[in-house]
């Protein structure tokens, strides 16, 4: 029986993901606004972590947090806890949600977990913020793990 004439054959259609084909990189002002809004979210998370240390550890927990070493440790952990779960699960942080942007891989799809972890760890590179002053305005935390921040609306 000819496949084209078979009335019982399932219909064939080509599915195209429109979102992957209409990628427009986020402008510098959106990226800067993402940074500011994400720092507010990071500050709120750090504040909650400090409160938890105070409630659980009492005066000893507060005294421990006031030392320089633990402050850096808690700050490092707060950044990891803020960026990795949000970007891995949703492709967005609080700042990206408000500004209408998201993280994608080079093909325009969902980045891998390794790329998200790489993005977050690259944020700790000294002077990484100055990487946005280049002509392309793509930070090292995007170029090294091969990701982009694109507009969604």
Image: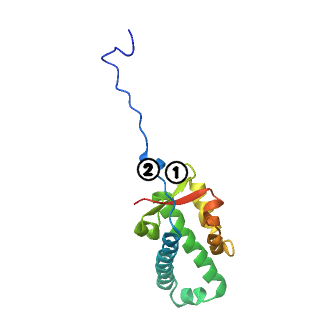
**Residue 30: which disc?**
none
Residue 39, image x and y in percent? 51, 77
Can you say whether 148 is above or below 64 in the image?
above
| Upstream in sequence: badge 1 or badge 2 | 2
Residue 132, image x and y in percent? 61, 70
SS class, disc 1? loop
Instruction: Tell me the residue that label 1 is attached to.
Output: 108
Point out the residue furthest to the right here: 126
Judged left or right of residue 114, residue 7 is left
Q: Residue at x 58, y 52 (%)?
A: 106
Q: Looking at the image, do the residues carrying marks 1 and 2 touch, with CB atoms under 8 Å apart?
A: yes
Q: Residue at x 60, y 62 (%)?
A: 142
Instruction: Tell me the residue that label 2 is attached to.
Output: 19
Can you say whether 51 is above or below 91 in the image?
below
SS class, disc 2? helix
- Along the line of sight, the residue nearer the viewer: 127 or 151: 151
Q: Residue at x 55, y 74 (%)?
A: 78
- Along the line of sight, the residue nearer the viewer: 128 or 78: 128
- Along the line of sight, the residue nearer the viewer: 14 or 110: 14
Residue 125, image x and y in percent? 68, 71
What number of labels is visible? 2
Q: CA distance from mark 1 to mark 2?
A: 8 Å
């Amino acid at each position: 029986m000819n496949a084209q004439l078979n009335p019982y054959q399932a219909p064939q259609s080509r599915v195209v993901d429109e979102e992957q084909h209409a990628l427009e990189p986020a402008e510098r002002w959106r990226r800067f606004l993402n940074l500011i809004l994400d720092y507010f979210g990071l500050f709120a998370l750090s504040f909650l972590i400090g409160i938890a240390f105070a409630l659980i550890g009492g005066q000893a927990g507060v005294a421990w947090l006031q030392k320089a070493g633990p402050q850096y440790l808690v700050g490092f952990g707060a950044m990891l806890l803020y960026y990795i779960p949000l970007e891995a699960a949703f492709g967005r942080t609080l700042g990206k949600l408000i500004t209408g942007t998201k993280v994608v891989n080079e093909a325009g799809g969902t980045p891998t977990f390794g790329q998200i972890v790489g993005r977050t760890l690259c944020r700790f590179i000294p002077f990484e913020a100055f990487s946005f002053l280049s002509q392309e305005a793509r930070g090292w935390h995007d170029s090294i793990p091969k990701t982009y921040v694109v507009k969604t609306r």
